[in-house]
Image: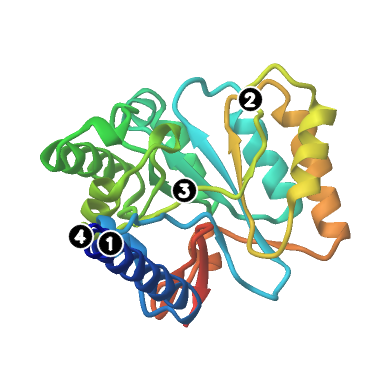
Amino acid sequence: MTRHKKVEGKRPIRICLLVVGMVLLLLLAGNFSGFFHIPTVIGQERKLPIYSVGTEEKKVAISFDAAWGNSHTGPILDILDQYGIKTTFFLVKFWADKYPEDVKEISRRGHEVQNHSATHPDMTTLSVEQIREEIESAGAAIEALTGIRPNLFRPPFGAYNNRVIETLEEMGYKVIQWSVDSLDWKEISADQIVQRVLSRIEPGAIVLFHNDAVYVEEYLPRILDALVAQGYEVVPISQLIFWENYHIDHTGKQIAN
């Protein structure tokens, strides 16, 4: 009787072990075959903005976020003119309201003027209605000054979540991050900024600068000289990215289908 009870007691344990083993085998098989897609099983899949573009062409985009001062904006435009380069500026509404002539001049010289929100908030803390208000307000201000409605958005602080991306996509925007952060807002030298950017450049890269960076007039020509020497073409972001028939991989790289 005792022996019989011991055998019966082990049977549930063996069954559990078999079940666990089968689950592990299925998960492993799914990991290699793609049969299981874990994010959709355990929760909503995380959406990503565009950090860079998958391309074999030696094309890159440089961009400037403008939210605070404007003392270097004119010199930046002059430097870009010297190289015949067009780029992308992401503007906050309160900056555009304060410096409307700068906004017009950026556009007049052929650069893209895109949306960086109205008040520079952490967009992940906002409701859908608040996100829409931020974007619509900034977009209307930019369009009133340039005659062109923005269709790219860069989140302040680089902060985003699914709600932000889905709302922007519904509004006809593509959300843009960066693959190369110059860190030009930090207390680092122009030499460090140049080295940092050039060491990270590759085809399809999107570089982040700021229009009020202390050393921008020093590092920008050096970086552009190097990019030209290496055979890169610098284009606005809208000319670098794909507008349809693409997917975004787990690193944020936009790849043509």
Which residue is outermost to the top? Answer: 187
By what rule are the colours in the image chosen?
A: rainbow
Q: Distance between the residues labelled 3 and 4?
A: 26 Å
Say whether marks 2 and 1 touch (CB < 8 Å).
no
Image coordinates of residue 121 in percent, x first then y, are 31, 27
Q: What element carries label 4?
A: helix
The nearer-to-camera label among 2 and 1 is 1
Mark 1 is on which residue type? Arg
Q: Which percent across, then down, holds residue 191?
A: 85, 29
- Answer with the quarter of the image where residue 128 lies: top left
Q: Residue furthest right?
A: 229
Query: Mark 2 to mark 1: distance in Å?
Result: 81 Å
Residue lying farthest to the left in this orientation: 129
Q: Which residue is drawn at 72% across and 41% down?
A: 79
Q: Which amino acid does label 3 sit on?
A: Ser
Tell which circle, 3 or 4, labels the residue nearer the N-terminal end. Answer: 3
Of marks 3 and 4, the one in the foreground: 4
Residue drawn where x is 50% and y is 77% of the image: 32
As rendered, which of 161 and 216 lies closer to the eye? Answer: 161
Camera-nearest residue between 219 and 184? 184
- Tag 1, which secondary structure? helix
Q: Which residue bears the numbered disc 1?
A: 3
42, above or below 100, in the image = below
Q: Name the residue under label 2.
A: 213
The mark nearer the N terminus, 3 or 2, is 3
Q: Are marks 4 and 1 in contact (CB under 8 Å)?
A: no
State the image coordinates of residue 240 (x, y, percent, origin top left).
56, 66
The residue where tag 4 is placed is 170
Indicate which disc, 1 or 3, sits on the residue closer to the N terminus. Answer: 1
User: Going from the N terminus, do you reach mark 2 or mark 1 first?
Assistant: 1
Q: Distance between the residues labelled 1 and 3?
A: 88 Å
